[in-house]
Amino acid sequence: RRPGELSGGQAQRVAVARALAADPGLLLLDEPMAALDVHAAPLLRRLLKRVLTGRRAIIVTHDVLDAYMLADTVVVLEAGRIVEQGPTREVLTRPRSRFAAGLAGLNLIPGTVTAAGLLPDPAGGGPGGPGAQGSPVTELAGRHEDTPIPGQAGVAAFPPSAVSVFPDQPHGSPRNAFAVTVTDLEPHGDQIRVRAGDLAADITPAASADLSLAPGVRAYFVVKAAAVSIYPA
């Protein structure tokens, strides 16, 4: 076909074939899935996974799925500086910076490790921080992934899908609950992502409507201790 007759996905696959034709010692890929539709992107991702086997490549991407499927090692750049690097799964399942946590799709609260959990940093978001106005700084309960060293700098990480949203503070249950102010609502697959400062919760559209959520509305984010991972910063 003539170049002008190719679809975006076909043109991208031709570009990859052209780059591979010279059998380069190092392949450089800059956002290889950019501008592809939902059908073409998975095809190219599977193609790259196959052809990159045994090859060295540097891939620039903002898509965590690209990193999981294609990369052995991840280097996270924020404002032009390396903030985290290491094996892909280790970096993306145990991020230590809020930027890396955002890429991995996790909430992250910095603080100080305690014997039972984490004491959040008042300036770091979460309970008592931005997005949680009026909420006292209380200990966050969770699962220690390493032997806790009280007083050590640490972080608590949990997925937005583990967060429930309530109009009032729930009582009588061993869960972490803290007041937040909703800052934004956005579609996220078949869910609604509720943002409150640096924190996020994923709920159904029906639940969002029932709670009458909108920017500026006060609510409570609630997460069970079993869903919170605590580890050194």
Image (tube, rainbow, N blue to C red):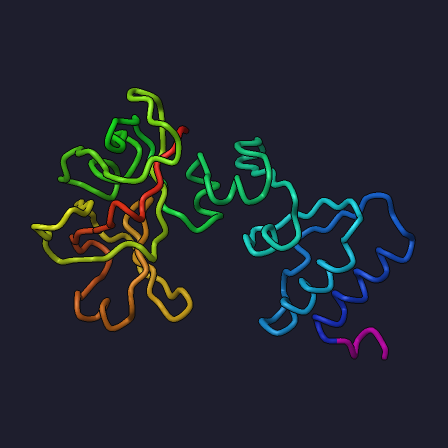
In the figure, is residue 192 to the left or right of 216?
right
Q: Is residue 157 above or below residue 124?
A: below
Q: Is residue 68 above or below residue 95?
A: below
In the figure, is residue 79 to the left or right of 175?
right
Name the spot of residue 205 as percent of width and height, x first.
28, 71
Q: In the picture, residue 156 is in which quadrant?
A: top left
- Residue extending farthest to the top is 151
Task: Name the one closer to the observer, 169 or 32.
Answer: 169
Provide the residue span drawn in magenta. Answer: 1-6
Name the spot of residue 45 as percent of width and height, x first.
67, 62
- Residue extending farthest to the right is 22
Name the spot of residue 213 as percent of width and height, x first.
21, 62
Picture residue at 53% right of the left edge, 32% below the top: 83
Name the spot of residue 43 as percent of width and height, x first.
68, 69
Q: Is residue 16 above or below residue 180?
A: below
Picture residue at 33% right of the left edge, 22% below the top: 149
Task: Name the one closer to the observer, 10 or 144.
Answer: 144
Task: Name the one closer to the observer, 44 or 156.
Answer: 156
Q: Quadrant of the C terminus?
A: top left
